[in-house]
Image (cartoon, grey):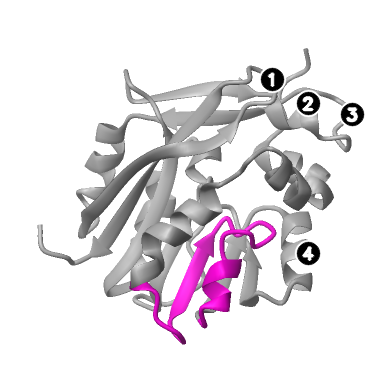
Amino acid sequence: MKPPKKAIEYYDEFAPEYDKLAIDYYWFSPKVMFGMLFDKICPNQKLLDIGIGTGLSSEPFKKMGMEIYGVDGSSEMLKICKRKNIAIDLQKIDLENSRLKYEDEFFDMVIANGVLYFLANIENVLAESVRVLKHNGILCINFEELSDGINEEYRNISNCVISEKLKEKTGVVVYKYNIDYVKNIISKLNVTIKEVLRYFAYKSPTTKEDVYFTLLVLQKGGDR
């Protein structure tokens, strides 16, 4: 089998199918994240969606009156998001290495749904998310949890199988993270863990196994 695609190449290729496949294969994570943050939403506040993709995670927040900003590494996903008129501003960036092009303490809420899953280095994106977050602002992240070790890299071919756009079923490299490793990173970032939830994220089309994510709701500068 050929080497797996980079995550950005992967999503550029099957972006037109993404929204339909999210429904077909029970990608409930946007609804879970929205539900966890519902009582913290205020109209006219600014939300940054890290890895906004086609806007599935941001759409319900937009309907509640929040101002949406988004960054992503995939040009094709951003094109689809732009057509939906969800966001005030959309930017293409390298999530692992780039500095966000927003000033300090600009956002009331930052979300990253199903994004850390694709990053070998999560320290930069977490630090940048906190930097642009206002004092007492909310950061919500999720990841596939690893029980032993710090992190684990593996090849996921599930979306290759379900996508008709992907002719070469090479898969994509994804990552699991130990929750203590994630907690150690965020302990250095002036945020407090407010809620933790482990939940069903989607069903694997290849193994038929239920895949679970761990979600953390964090507050910047909150009481420890």
Image quadrant holding the C terminus, namely bottom left
For marks 1 and 4, the one nearer the N-term is 4
Amino acid type shown at disc 3: Lys
Which residue was labeled with disc 1?
A: 206
Which residue was labeled with disc 2?
A: 161
Residue at 78 percent across and 17 percent down: it is 2
For marks 1 and 3, the one nearer the N-term is 3
Which residue was labeled with disc 4?
A: 79
Residue 30 as seen in the image, left or right of residue 152: right
Element type at mark 1: loop
Amino acid type shown at disc 4: Lys
Residue 216 as seen in the image, left or right of residue 8: left
Residue at 47 percent across and 52 percent down: it is 32
* Vertical relation: 162 (above or below) 57: above
- Magenta stretch, residue numbers: 40-65
For marks 1 and 2, the one nearer the N-term is 2
Q: Choose between 174 and 44: the one closer to the eye.
A: 44
Q: Position of residue 85 (x, y in %)?
A: 71, 77
Q: Give the Cα separation between the discs numbered 1 and 2.
A: 7 Å
Q: Give the Cα separation between the discs numbered 3 and 2.
A: 9 Å
